[in-house]
Image (cartoon, helix red, strand yellow):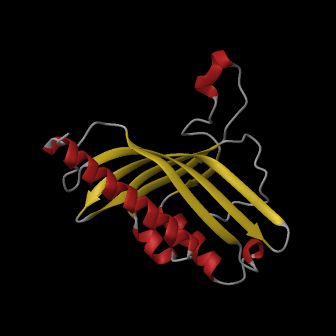
């Protein structure tokens, strides 16, 4: 079976997007935060609303609204400050540093596109699993999903918006010093 040019273009774009996310996971696991920060646009919104337990007929209220309280609601300047704080070596929740592993999966475009032109955007959804071990016995497993707006920037992309949904309504981790 021969693949059409359109299908090949779509598969090539998806592979490029997957590589972007896999490289991001490596940057985080290797603590290469300067490279990681460069993946985000200057106008980024990095947002993790709080999940709530609601009845089935009230699912629209399962997460806090965009103008309501959130676990994280950062712009680029705040992300830079969080990284600088971690890199001081005096961050109480990360001294000694945690061992972290990011797994990213179920990456998919929400629109049927075969290319993203310079400056154009596309919405990408993905799932994540983050394993963190700190000291000898502290272990956190964070599972969830992300919805990103990617903008084409030269040969790569930049994240202009990231919405993070963890699959818990009560944060079991002692802190949120990991990035998603």
Q: Residue furthest bottom?
A: 89
Q: Quadrant of residue 173?
A: bottom right
Quadrant of the rendering where the C terminus is positioned: bottom right
**Image coordinates for residue 144, horizontal then vertical, percent:** 61, 46
Q: Quadrant of residue 132?
A: bottom right
Extreme right residue here?
137
Q: Nearer the viewer, residue 43 or 120?
A: 120
Left/right placement of residue 69 relative to residue 119 reads: right
Please indicate, yes or no, whether residue 42 appears anywhere in the rendered image. no
Locate residue 125, reporting x and y percent. 45, 44
**Rendered-image quadrant of the N terminus:** top left
Residue 66 seen from this side: yes
* Residue located farthest toward the top when viewing the structure as drawn: 57
Q: Residue furthest left?
A: 5
In this rendering, the answer to whether 20 lies above or below 29 is: above
Q: Residue at x 77, y 71 (%)?
A: 134
Q: Which image quadrant for residue 92?
A: bottom right
Q: Position of residue 80 (x, y in %)?
A: 52, 71
């Amino acid at each position: 079976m021969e693949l059409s040019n359109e299908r090949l273009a779509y598969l090539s774009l998806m592979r490029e997007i997957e590589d972007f996310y896999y490289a991001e996971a490596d940057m985080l696991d290797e603590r290469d935060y300067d490279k990681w920060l460069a993946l985000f646009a200057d106008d980024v919104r990095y947002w993790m609303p709080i999940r709530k337990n609601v009845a089935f007929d009230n699912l629209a209220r399962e997460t806090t609204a965009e103008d309501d309280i959130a676990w994280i609601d950062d712009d680029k300047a705040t992300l830079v400050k969080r990284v600088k704080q971690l890199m001081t070596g005096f961050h109480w929740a990360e001294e000694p540093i945690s061992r972290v592993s990011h797994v990213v999966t179920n990456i998919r475009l929400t629109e049927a596109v075969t290319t993203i032109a310079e400056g154009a955007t596309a919405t990408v959804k993905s799932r994540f699993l983050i394993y963190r071990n700190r000291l000898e016995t502290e272990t956190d497993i964070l599972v969830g999903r992300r919805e990103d707006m990617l903008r084409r920037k030269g040969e790569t992309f930049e994240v202009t918006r990231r919405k993070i949904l963890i699959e818990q309504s009560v944060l079991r981790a002692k802190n949120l010093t990991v990035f998603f």
